[in-house]
Image: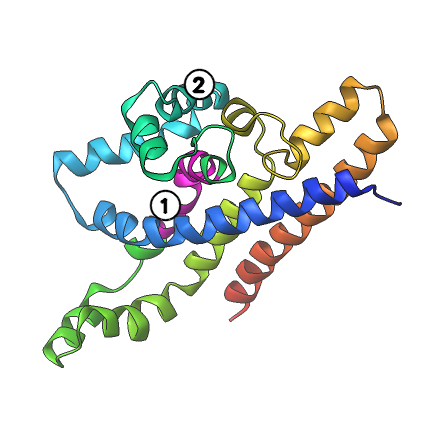
Amino acid sequence: MQLGSDAISAILLTLELALFSTAALMLLATPLAWWLQSSRSRGARVVEIIVALPLVLPPTVIGFYLLIAFSPNHWLGAQWLAITGSTLAFSFLGLVIGSMIYSLPFVVQPLQTAFAQLDKKLLEMAQVQGLNYWQQFSQIIFPLCQRGFIGAFVLGFAHTLGEFGVVLMIGGNIPDQTRVASIAIFDAVERLDYAQAHQLSAVMLIIAVLALTVLYWRKGSHHAR
């Protein structure tokens, strides 16, 4: 299997997008999941519903509203254009933001589950011993919830790999900037270039299988203990 430079560029851009989006999501989703799991307020339940919306909304709906928001004719897009001189729509950063929104529940929900299983008495003991929040996280929460963190990262990464609707709506099809693998596969099929489509699909399938293997291997090793 010999991939052309355009195909390699699309795959590398897809991996870059998945890594950036998932890393940023872990930073955002960790405190959010902790708050959603521990809070009993109505506000938390409303936020939980909003976070879960990408699970049921068509990706094109999310992409459409993000495209409007990123437009220079609307507040967010206009402010970004005024500050940076460039638009959010049809940019790599726009793809990162869109992918984060679309993959948010796939990262938040595994973390919520992991945090719910954590024995809160351990944190109470840590507070008595004078550990600050960062020490509690690094010495207790992260080690005991490590499987949840790994699962959240892998699911967010794998979900971003296969995204099509959102990236097409807000990113278009700009080579080396927004043309990710899913868009390249669609283009190849439209051109009836099934050989190229097969090659790209095979590479993405291998990457996805490897990511899920890590996830289920971790689950298996955990149950074996």
Residue in front for this viewpoint, 198 or 107? 198
Task: Name the spot of residue 140 as percent of width and height, x first.
Answer: 29, 72
Q: Which of 16 and 217 lies nearest the eye of the viewer?
A: 16
Query: Label 1 belongs to which residue?
Result: 108
Q: Residues within 10 Å of mark 2 (few under 14, many from 20)?
A: some
Examine the structure image and report whether residue 187 is included in the region drawn in magenta: no
- Extent of the magenta region: 96-113
Q: How is the image coloured?
A: rainbow
Q: Is residue 163 left or right of residue 86?
A: right
- On the rendered structure, is 2 left or right of 225? right
| Residue 64 marker | 2
Looking at the image, residue 17 sits to the left or right of residue 23; the answer is: right
- 51 on left or right of 7: left
Residue at 44% across, 41% down: 106
Using the numbered discs, state the Cα–Cα distance from disc 1 to disc 2 in whole angstroms.
23 Å
Amino acid found under the numbered disc labelled 2: Phe
Q: How dense is the environment of label 1, judged by Cα within 10 Å: few (below 14), some, or many (20 and up)?
A: many
Quadrant in which residue 214 is drawn? bottom right
Residue under the point 42% across and 46% down: 107
Residue 73 at x, y = what percent? 34, 18
Report the residue at 87% width, 31% height from top: 195
Which of the image's four quarters has the N terminus? top right
Q: Position of residue 223 (x, y in %)?
A: 51, 63
Q: Secondary structure at mark 2?
A: helix
- Residue 63, relative to residue 209: is it above or below? above
User: Which comes before the other along the chain, label 1 or label 2?
Assistant: 2
Residue 53 locus on image (x, y percent):
36, 27
Q: Secondary structure at mark 1?
A: helix
Q: Tell which of 125 and 103 is nearer to you.
A: 103
Q: Quadrant of residue 135?
A: bottom left
What residue lies at 37% left-to-right and 44% top-to-bottom? 109
- Given residues 33 and 204, the one toward you in this image is 204
